[in-house]
Image (cartoon, coloured by chain):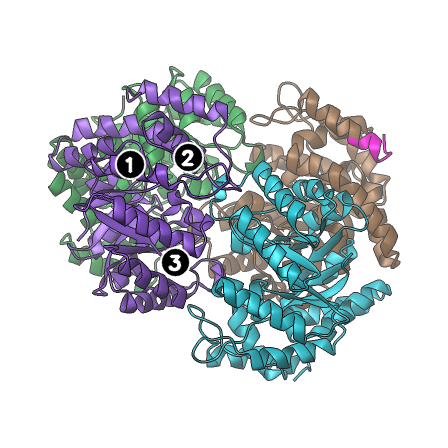
Chain colours: A green, B purple, C cyan, D brown
């Protein structure tokens, strides 16, 4: 069972677009000292779609090797073809992943009916050596995993949870209602972390936790301890910086913020471009405003 | 300032499509005995778009006359033209409305930029004798009032709050963050009542409160008293019936449910059709399942 | 049967927001001398949603009285409630309308299933004294009338055609394929006039024909005469000005262009605002560029 | 310069999900005898997203080797990262591709602003040894290449055209208007082939041409010869089968239809499933109805 806060780690690149493993190592050490429950390697904020197959697993291997052994590592293994996702899940498991995180295939949007998706996730879960965490990310995939589909999939013994980045709090509540207590419903964005916890989410996988892991973990503690007013205050405080480094400036903004907070963001890979000076300025102002810089 | 739970009351029709004032009177008496803070007349669930101008104000007059004088009455006065909305606001105020609820104009969706909407609501608020409550309902209007626009409008001395039926919990949280403490942020649907309260909403205007007013009011109390586990349980319990009488079967479903629970739903007006037997059966089952029937 | 080019006439307003019947009369006389087959009164470009019920029919009466008796007048009678649409159709017919143009009801988007819409249009067509023209306008209504629904409705003896402003050329082609030869399939925007005619549309109702009626009529003639290269050239030439006075600057832009071309645009009614100087400048440049100014 | 009809060839799979090169060879021979101007390898209908990198280029190599040397071969080389697309373009060119077809990167939808896309396509075109054809496919990517962006990109000496599968006929017309005469504007779906040709498209890349290449080519000839009535008739006749093998049943439907018409469809790769018996029956009926079976 998965609980608490995970961060989908950024992948720093050098000026020549190669992976900057030195910076990655620095970050892994730093995250390892926080209260994070674990990391997600090859998540959306890891620019996994910009990595070759070989690069992907070199990052996985490196991250598992250099990260705190008392924490968990979930690996994103999304592919369009069933057989490729299965291969990737096996490879990740072989490298020591605790679980794999899997998007629905989404290129042929019109064909991805619930029955196709049910069979896809079931086929993969049947073969994956480690538990599967579903990954709902309609903003990037154009496909929503409904609470009804999630509930059906949750009965598979090797499907352990869902990261829901859809932002529909009713759907998250329905998922909590319709799945067993040991199914890990995770929020996928800090913007609705507190409300998701309020309706029963067990944790979250948060881009913002790359740079503000302790604040994210603290919010979980406050809700657990029923300190609702304080939790609300912290939630409201984190909203704007979260918007800047996820929605507004995306991965490039997140990397720029990482640089400001003692992490090593490195460069994004093309077609993404580094955050502009204006974006950096706006991010810096907000970090100062909330007192973390 | 507005707080607590309001319900946008249904308008019962006779078989000949005329308004059934007898049934309306029955319902008003019954709602008046609950813990509701007030009602909304001519809201979306009141089928206001199916009423002629004269019918609209006959319903307003009747409702104000027959409803508990210790509770508040908000009147929907949305029109497309600025001057018609102002006229309707004046007329509602003249009949005793405590506030008016106003949608953005939305026929010319492409033209409804923030500047146009800002001027529209400001012009109306300048002239309305009673406070204005903004009404965000993108599902029906195709237009979202952003938290930035709401924050600007909240500074108008005669704009008192917002009913946000967009379902975007991040936007609700941003609105709470960016408006003064006496600006009434209201959730617009029971599906996210508890999370909205958790992030700071002061109340809600809920279709479901037509038929289950006490349950809705109880949820507000539980959150206020920090009884989060109980609040969550109640929130999850109300999700499915709420979906049936709002999303899935809409006003027709809500009227059918009203009939089952001692209210008088009456018929919807065409083009809406009464709930089918199958819909009624599904609603009845769910009402029994949650123990209110 | 309806053929050729109609224009949904603009409604000029005075500075005090009252209807400027003098300007309307000027325009009606001018349109009456063109090759237009007719006009549509109370269409989207007529700001019908900003008119009171009484104003609507005063405009209809005035337009029918002052327009060329050898041309046709179609009147928009869209309402949300079936009974109101029927009333308006009867009233328009009583004033001399040749047909009525009707949008699907659209406030309760989720409830407007095909069966509801089929019954709505059938109920109205049963009672309307004059033929009904369907009006598909998903950009404003959020609802698309599918070609399958249109085909079913086309069998009603009192449903004579459709104005399709959806812009989906495949749907227009399907509608031509699936309806009888005497069912009038009309394009709803100049942007796809030539392609619509190419796949079999019989005519069009065009905002642009308010200001460039002869060019629109000429395009129909060119396609009829199989002068495809010339038709294409004219179609491409009209694209940009059409975008400016429909999509980009909407009714306000159309009214500004009318003023430049010898028509009397008058002001829009609030919340719409008059075209800005920058918008007027852009429109003027384009009118000069295509040689009509 | 590219003209006429290309088909994005299907990739037949065996029961064990390996590529069925025997069936591919059969099809290549058959397509080579038609009037097709060329084929697209690794297009959407080729299930390119389900192929590993090595499989992709084995298919390219095989197709170029076995296809009619007098016709052209365009190769899809879309990747998310700029550097991977460049690598793939070079590899395709090395194998003999006449051009490469490239989608916009689309995973980070929010970040794919026009400036990013302009730089992406420019960077790739700078390095590609063969001409680039842009590929607009918003249905699958969630991103639309606007006519303004296409016009800017069309000035690059190594960007030769666009396949536009967006279905917006106004955008296709704008693209024709705003690009030079030697820029190849191609329709991307048979549903709007004739209207696209009418407004000036030079050709098309059509899934339907996998199974009905001669009919697609004939439609181009009819428009060229100004035989508009016949062209319209053929366009209307092809609409339904086109919907069945693209929209409704997708690649699986197309493969089933191929089997019926003397081609070898083979199986799709998971998560796609073979067409159901009901789908096959519907496709067969339509093929009979239009007289090709």
Mark 1 neighbour class, 10 Å CA radius: few under 14, some 14 to 19, many 20 or more: many
Q: Which residue is mark 3?
A: B104
Instruction: Report x, y in % for residue B123.
Output: 32, 69
Q: Which residues are magenta?
A: D286-293
The mark nearer the N terminus, 2 or 1, is 1
Instruction: Report x, y in % for residue B222.
Output: 15, 32
Note whether B53 is above or below C209 in the view shown: above
Are discs 3 and 1 located on one and the same chain?
A: yes
Q: Which residue is mark 2?
A: B266
The mark nearer the N terminus, 3 or 1, is 3
> Which is more foreground, mark 2 or mark 1?
2
**D6 or D88: which is nearer to us?**
D6
Please give the chain letter of the residue carrying mark 2.
B
Q: Which mark is residue B209?
A: 1
**Residue in view at x 31 percent, y 63 percent:** B90
Are discs 2 and 1 located on one and the same chain?
A: yes
Q: CA distance from mark 3 to mark 1?
A: 24 Å
Q: Quick one: SS at disc 1?
A: helix
Q: Quick one: SS at disc 3?
A: loop
Q: Quick one: SS at disc 2?
A: loop
Mark 3 neighbour class, 10 Å CA radius: few under 14, some 14 to 19, many 20 or more: many
The mark nearer the N terminus, 3 or 2, is 3
In the image, is D51 to the left or to the right of D176?
left
> Which is more foreground, mark 3 or mark 2?
2
In the image, is A106 to the left or to the right of A35?
right
**Residue in view at x 18 percent, y 27 percent:** B229
């Amino acid at each position: 069972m998965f609980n608490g806060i995970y961060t989908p780690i950024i992948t720093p690149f050098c000026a020549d677009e190669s992976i900057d493993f030195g910076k990655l190592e620095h970050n892994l050490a730093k995250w390892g000292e926080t209260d994070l429950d674990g990391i997600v390697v090859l998540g959306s904020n890891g620019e996994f779609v910009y990595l070759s197959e070989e690069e992907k697993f070199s990052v996985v291997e490196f991250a598992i090797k250099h990260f705190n052994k008392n924490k968990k590592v979930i690996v994103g293994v999304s592919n369009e073809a069933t057989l490729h996702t299965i291969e990737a899940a096996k490879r990740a498991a072989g490298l020591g992943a605790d679980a794999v995180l899997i998007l629905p295939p989404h290129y042929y949007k019109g064909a991805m009916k619930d029955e196709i998706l049910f069979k896809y996730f079931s086929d993969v879960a049947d073969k994956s050596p480690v538990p599967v965490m579903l990954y709902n990310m309609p903003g990037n995939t154009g496909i929503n995993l409904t609470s009804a589909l999630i509930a059906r999939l949750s009965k598979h013994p090797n499907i352990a949870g869902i990261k829901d980045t859809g932002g529909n709090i009713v759907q998250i509540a329905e998922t909590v209602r319709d799945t067993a207590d040991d199914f890990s419903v995770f929020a996928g964005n800090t913007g609705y972390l507190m409300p998701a916890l309020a309706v029963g989410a067990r944790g979250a996988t948060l881009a913002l936790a790359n740079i503000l892991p302790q604040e994210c973990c603290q919010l979980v503690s406050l809700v657990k301890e029923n300190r609702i007013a304080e939790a609300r205050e912290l939630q409201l405080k984190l909203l704007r910086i979260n918007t800047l480094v996820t929605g507004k400036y995306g991965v490039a903004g997140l990397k720029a913020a990482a640089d400001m907070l003692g992490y090593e963001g490195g460069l994004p890979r093309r077609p993404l471009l580094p955050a502009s000076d204006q974006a950096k300025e706006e991010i810096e102002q907000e970090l100062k405003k909330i007192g973390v810089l």
